Image (spheres, rainbow, N blue to C red):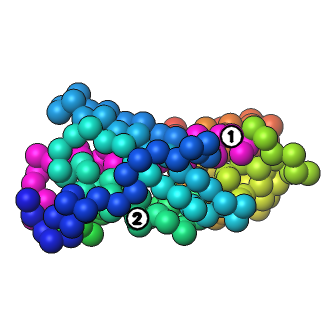
Amino acid sequence: MSSDLVKKHFFTPQNVGEIEGADGVGRAGSIICGAALRVSLSIDESQRVAGAKFKAAGCSYLVAACSFLTDAVMGKTTGEAAALYQSEEMLIERMSSDWPCDRTHCAALAREALIAAIRTYSDAVRNEWSGDEALICTCFGVSEHTIERAIETASLHTNAEVTNATNAGAGCRSCCPLIQDMLDLYWRENSIQIPANHS
């Protein structure tokens, strides 16, 4: 096993278990090694992670990655948690300088399950939203009107441009299809075709 941090999180893993009545649950599995993982999250009223637990059937690297990641997201907003490690490489770099190449998928599984848990929470919040404006990005609290105004005033054409302008889509990305629909509708209504290279 590699670094002291990896050893610490494997031999004394944090946050093992399952949250009863979780606000978000995410699963991930690997056909490479047969590992399976479940992450459950409790989110407080300020959209911060109040609890994060995992159940994993896999190797020491998967357990260490899950323990580290669930520790890292505690107290973060859902947006911050989803954006914390945008790739498994970023997670691996933070944990160990000599993480084995054949265990990269372990870090990817940990990320995948966490993002899936945040997505299920975000989807549920959108479905239950009763505010005056439609809430598109729950991770960063971005409304439909904010996105529409940004598209119009800055002549935005892509999801990435909307994210740069408003933060919408920078978290779990479950709102990206909704943002794309808004872009398509705006440009269709304005009789302007989105260039082919702006997919």
Specify whether residue 112 is painted magenta. yes
Q: CA distance from mark 2 to mark 1?
A: 24 Å
At x 57%, y 62%, the residue is 50
Front in this rendered view, residue 78 or 199:
78
- Magenta segment, principal secondary structure? helix
Residue furthest to the right in view is 132
At x 56%, y 61%, the residue is 49
Front in this rendered view, residue 140 or 45:
45
Say which label, 2 or 1, has the lower sequence index.
2
Specify whether residue 2 is painted magenta. no
- What is the magenta range? 97-126
At x 88%, y 51%, the residue is 131
- Amino acid type at circle 2 is Asp
- Amino acid type at circle 1 is Ala
At x 56%, y 43%, the residue is 20
- For residue 80, above or below residue 35: below
**Residue wearing tag 2:** 71
- For residue 40, above or below residue 32: below
Does residue 96 appear to the left or right of 47 in the view shown? left
What number of labels is visible?
2
Q: Position of residue 29 (x, y in %)?
A: 32, 33
**Residue wearing tag 1:** 124
Q: Position of residue 6 (x, y in %)?
A: 19, 64
Q: Residues within 10 Å of mark 2 (few under 14, many from 20)?
A: some
Q: SS for tag 2?
A: helix
Does residue 52 appear to the left or right of 147 in the view shown? left
